Image (tube, rainbow, N blue to C red):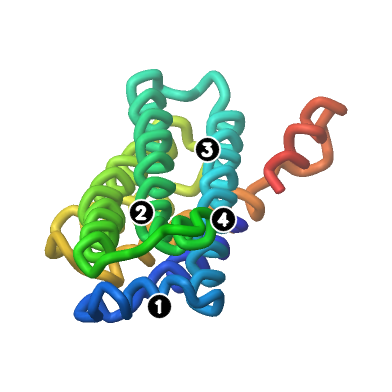
Amino acid sequence: MVYTVLALVSMVLLSRLPDLALSDAEMTAWFADSGHQAPLVLGLNLASISAVALLWFVAVIRRRVGEREDRFFGTVFFGSSIAFVVVWVSAAAMLAAPAVAMNVFDSASVSASSASLSAGLGASLLLVVAPRLQAVFIFAVSNVIIRSGFLPRWLAIVGFCTGLFMLVVPLVFTPLGLAFPIWVFVVSIVILLNRPTAQGLDATDELETAGDV
């Protein structure tokens, strides 16, 4: 749930980019403005924290599945999560790179071409590469849910539909970035609602359940 909130806020902040038709001097002045730098730098920081929150989400699912985890889908699930985190943080860094450069280096300047390249690379990772990794992640989790039964079956069906949507939509489709955080939020709510009851739990079980929060 923390991942969802931070990721959505981060995407909004990182989308606050200048008009790429500005001249080199205007582009440098835009990124030199602290009012423009701050949202981009904050967005990058929130993206980094959200990546840690997503890894926590992955750890919770793997612990809840326990010995019931299918090794094949478990490997795909874990591997796709790591790959997506790398792509997500890299995309955020590219989008915020000009602002960070202007903030860190006194003699830095930003040309229109370099700003366009940075924004294009970040958008490519965020809107083309990331959704495919997210779809694989969702498919893997949905298969784990069906095979282990640790969460309701309807959640797996929703996951398959979401993953399919993310694979078949046009390659560059901005709202697509909202699908994955929303799906993570829904799964997190279901996990919290399906926590083991206090009756019959030993001290270890109670400690593990608390970690889901």
Q: Which residue shows up at 83% across the image and 39% down it?
A: 199
Mark 1 is surrounded, within 10 Å at the Cα level, by few (under 14), some (14 to 19) or many (20 or more) other residues, namely: many
Return the residue at label 4.
Answer: 45
Q: Amino acid at mark 2?
A: Met
Of the image marks 3 and 4, the number of the one nearer the N terminus: 4
Return the residue at label 1.
Answer: 30
Of the image marks 1 and 4, the number of the one nearer the N terminus: 1
The mark closer to the camera, 2 or 3, is 2
Return the residue at label 2.
Answer: 94
The mark closer to the camera, 1 or 2, is 1
Mark 3 is surrounded, within 10 Å at the Cα level, by few (under 14), some (14 to 19) or many (20 or more) other residues, namely: some
Residues at discs 2 and 3 in contact (Cβ within 8 Å): no
Alpha carbon of mark 3 to alpha carbon of mark 4: how far?
Answer: 20 Å
The mark closer to the camera, 1 or 4, is 1
Of the image marks 2 and 3, the number of the one nearer the N terminus: 3
Return the residue at label 3.
Answer: 58
